[in-house]
Image: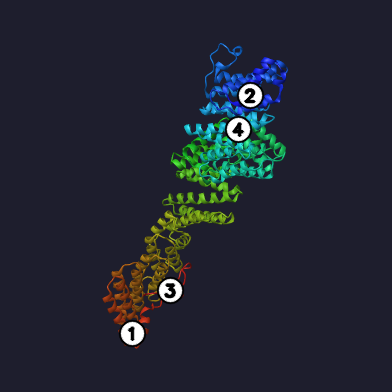
């Protein structure tokens, strides 16, 4: 027996012998009881200490039976003895029943019994008894026992007049929850552990052990989320009763609220609510900041939506009434799934005032929450759950229910999403969209959205009948819709449907032309609205490009192809494929604008094959030498300018293919000097690409042309270029030979040896291009050849 327990045992024995009440009423007796509890080791011998303390309080009660609290305390300690070591019970207290087993459930039940009869704040050693019982229950915890203890300890900590016992008990339970999480891996257990350990750390500031256990639990609960872990620990480390603590708690509230909005997970919502409750309980002022109360109240209302717990709704409403509000929005405002505009996304904002009185409202909000969760995760399982929840909400809604139309629209939108994701039959979303449209009266402001939704479902698998229905619906939506974003989407979809319908017109040329013209006009309207609403213009421009190409294919107007080329952007595989097909047969009216648009796109696209195809297409503007009114060599000049720009962009292989064509065009036009220049540049590029054989061939061909033209200096430059290539390949003898030949040519031309060497390294000047596309950068200096 420990020394403190021995002192208490001696006091009780002396009291029984001398019958001196002072021995029992002496405050030192209670101090000895507390010290004896603190000296307990956690094994079966603790039952002896508990028996002594029970006898002390039983004696106090017998001396004055008005002290019923002492009787309750005695009963609590004797009950603990009955579980730990029944043989130590006084004979008068032993019953005939089988002693309870030593299990987590038994110890948790004993904690419940103690709280039922005793306030731990009555005596410090009662709080220590709670610690001892919780420690034993948490040694080998079960989910049921841990859940019972968590609920009980948190409730009693709030009710107790002196909750100083609570941090120790919560910390012990938190450790047990962490161990239980290690066995099961259930997320709710580690979330519970974080909560109870956080409250323990807040209630016992400066307790390093509690902070360490909290940090360990956070590592499991929020892996990789260092910001959240730091926010928890900063709040736990802050000094109680100070503004620093309140600021830290407010920061944690904001962070957990953002996490909840981002994930739309029920576990994250519960974590936020728990943080909000901690912020209120440990705020340094009497009245918490509205930045805590308002979101916390909204969180409670949303928790009611998730669980149906009316106590949560009542508490949330009370806080909102205190703040002067009555209709909270959910924690995470409605967002359309996958970027789609959801006609029912705001069902909560207008209906939440009827929560608690109209069961459909809660179902509608729950369905909207599931829909938002799918928008975050994109998981098929979440989409299926969302559809089931929306059906459950929409099913019992009578025709005159204010939320019915929006619920039907949400259902149609979700079914549309599933059909798009899975490629399933669109019949179900079409039927749902028609039902949603029928539920929206003609004057309903949401009717244009329902019309757009129906058109989207119809466009999943178009037929002549559904295309006509979609066009009619979209045109009706455009006559009544005021929202610019909705109008932009409607114009875009109208353009797509009209293009499809024009393609199905067959021999009806007049109808085909009308639909194609309307499709282009609708696409232009979508682009204009994208500009007005500051939306990304790329999708609308892509749509216009497709419409222009479709009209070009149908009507053959080269201006449509020119504009489509100007609007095209790299990376749009579908559009570039259609453009490539349109380039196969150049239009008869090939003008400079069309050629320039093709040349610009050739430099923008990273597809080398398409670049070459676009440049070949643009060449048709010049035709063979002398045709179409162009000056001889215009085609070669155009190709040379393109090749130079491609080289500047680092696209040397493509530049070389264009240079070879430029050289041929110059040769065909009889401009042999320009052909030689193109070949010289070709040799330089091949050398840069480490292709010495091709480089030497190009330089040799260029030198031969210059030799035939009698341009000694230019011929010398080509020989010098060949020398550089040969030196790089490890053939110094041939390299020296080429340099000597270059020097000899320069000397024969009357140049000094040093100047000849210098001249041999200078590049020939670039010929100015005939057509320079808008995005081409002009070259300010001569091109390098060697």
Give the number of the mark in front: 1 or 4: 4
Foreground of the two, 595 or 414: 414
Foreground of the two, 596 or 498: 596
Instruction: Tell me the residue that label 3 is attached to.
Output: 770
Q: For numbered disc 1, what is the local secondary structure?
A: helix
Q: Earlier in the sequence, mark 1 or mark 4?
A: 4
Instruction: Tell me the residue that label 1 is attached to.
Output: 746
Q: Residues within 10 Å of mark 2 (few under 14, many from 20)?
A: some
Q: Residue at x 32, y 74 (%)?
A: 724
Foreground of the two, 553 or 343: 343
Q: Earlier in the sequence, mark 1 or mark 3?
A: 1
Q: Residue at x 26, y 76 (%)?
A: 733
From the viewer's perspective, tell me whether residue 191 is left or right of residue 26.
left
Q: Residue at x 66, y 21 (%)?
A: 11
Give the number of the mark in front: 1 or 2: 2
Q: Residues within 10 Å of mark 4 (few under 14, many from 20)?
A: many
Q: For numbered disc 3, what is the local secondary structure?
A: loop
């Amino acid at each position: 027996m420990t020394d403190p327990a021995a002192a208490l045992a001696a006091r009780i024995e002396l009291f029984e012998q001398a019958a001196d009440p002072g021995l029992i009423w002496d405050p030192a007796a209670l101090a000895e009881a507390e010290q004896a509890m603190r000296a307990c080791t956690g094994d079966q011998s603790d039952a002896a200490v508990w028996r002594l303390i029970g006898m002390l309080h039983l004696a106090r009660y017998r001396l004055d039976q008005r002290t019923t609290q002492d009787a309750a305390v005695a009963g609590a300690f004797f009950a603990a003895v009955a579980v730990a070591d029944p043989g130590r019970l006084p004979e008068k207290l032993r019953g005939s029943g089988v002693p309870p087993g030593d299990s987590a459930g038994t110890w948790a039940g004993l904690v419940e019994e103690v709280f039922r009869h005793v306030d731990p704040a009555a005596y410090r050693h009662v709080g220590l008894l709670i610690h001892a019982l919780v420690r034993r229950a948490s040694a080998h915890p079960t989910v049921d026992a841990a859940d019972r203890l968590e609920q009980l300890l948190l409730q009693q900590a709030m009710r107790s007049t002196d909750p100083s016992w609570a941090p120790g008990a919560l910390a012990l339970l938190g450790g047990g929850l962490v161990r239980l999480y290690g066995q099961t891996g259930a997320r709710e257990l580690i979330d519970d552990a974080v909560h109870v350990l956080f409250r323990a750390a807040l209630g016992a500031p400066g307790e390093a052990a509690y902070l360490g256990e909290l940090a360990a639990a956070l590592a499991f609960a929020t892996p990789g989320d260092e910001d959240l872990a730091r926010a928890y620990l900063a709040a736990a480390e802050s000094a109680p009763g100070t503004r620093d603590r309140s600021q830290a708690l407010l920061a944690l509230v904001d962070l957990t609220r953002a996490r909840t909005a981002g994930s739309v997970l029920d576990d994250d919502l519960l974590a936020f609510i728990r943080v909000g409750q901690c912020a209120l309980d440990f705020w340094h002022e009497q009245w918490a900041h509205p930045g805590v109360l308002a979101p916390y109240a909204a969180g409670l209302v949303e928790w009611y939506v998730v669980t149906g717990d009316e106590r949560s709704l009542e508490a949330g409403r009370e806080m909102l009434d205190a703040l002067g509000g009555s209709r909270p929005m959910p924690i995470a405002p409605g967002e359309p799934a996958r970027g789609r505009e959801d006609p029912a996304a705001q069902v909560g904002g207008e209906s939440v005032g009827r929560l608690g009185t109209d069961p459909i409202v809660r179902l509608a909000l729950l369905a909207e929450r599931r829909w938002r969760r799918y928008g975050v995760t994109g998981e098929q399982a979440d989409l299926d759950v969302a559809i089931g929840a929306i059906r459950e909400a929409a099913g019992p809604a009578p025709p005159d229910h204010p939320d019915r139309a929006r619920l039907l629209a949400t259902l149609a939108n979700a079914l549309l999403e599933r059909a798009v994701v899975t490629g399933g039959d669109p019949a179900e979303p079409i039927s749902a969209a028609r039902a949603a449209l029928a539920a929206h009266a003609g004057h309903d402001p949401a009717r244009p959205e329902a019309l757009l939704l129906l058109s989207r479902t119809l466009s999943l698998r178009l037929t002549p009948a559904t295309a006509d229905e979609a066009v009619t619906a979209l045109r009706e939506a455009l006559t009544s819709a005021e929202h610019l974003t909705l109008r932009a989407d409607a114009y875009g979809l109208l353009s797509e449907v009209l293009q499809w319908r024009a393609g199905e017109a067959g021999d009806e040329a007049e109808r085909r032309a009308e639909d194609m013209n309307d499709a282009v006009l609708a696409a232009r309207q979508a682009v204009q609205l994208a500009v007005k609403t500051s939306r990304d213009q790329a999708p609308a421009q892509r749509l216009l490009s497709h419409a222009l190409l479709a009209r070009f294919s149908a009507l053959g107007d080269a201006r449509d192809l020119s504009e489509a080329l100007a609007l095209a952007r790299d990376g749009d595989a579908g559009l570039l494929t259609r453009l490539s097909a349109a380039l196969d047969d150049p239009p008869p009216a090939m003008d400079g604008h069309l050629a320039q648009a093709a040349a610009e796109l050739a430099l923008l696209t990273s597809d080398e094959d398409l670049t070459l195809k676009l440049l070949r297409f643009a060449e048709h503007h010049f035709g063979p030498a002398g045709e179409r009114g162009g000056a001889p060599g215009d085609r070669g000049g155009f190709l040379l300018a393109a090749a130079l720009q491609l080289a500047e962009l680092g696209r040397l292989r493509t530049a070389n293919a264009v240079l070879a064509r430029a050289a041929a065009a110059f040769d065909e036009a009889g401009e042999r000097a320009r052909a030689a220049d193109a070949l010289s540049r070709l040799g330089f590029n091949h050398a840069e690409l480490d292709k010495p054989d091709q480089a030497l061939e190009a330089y040799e061909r260029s030198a031969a042309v210059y030799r035939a033209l009698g341009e000694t200096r230019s011929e010398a430059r080509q020989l010098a270029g060949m020398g550089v290539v040969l030196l790089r390949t490890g053939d110094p003898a041939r390299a020296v030979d080429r340099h000597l030949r270059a020097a000899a040519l320069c000397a024969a031309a009357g140049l000094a040896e040093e100047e000849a060497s210098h001249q041999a390294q200078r590049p020939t000047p670039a010929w100015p291009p005939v057509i320079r596309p808008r995005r081409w950068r002009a070259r300010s200096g001569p091109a390098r050849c060697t």
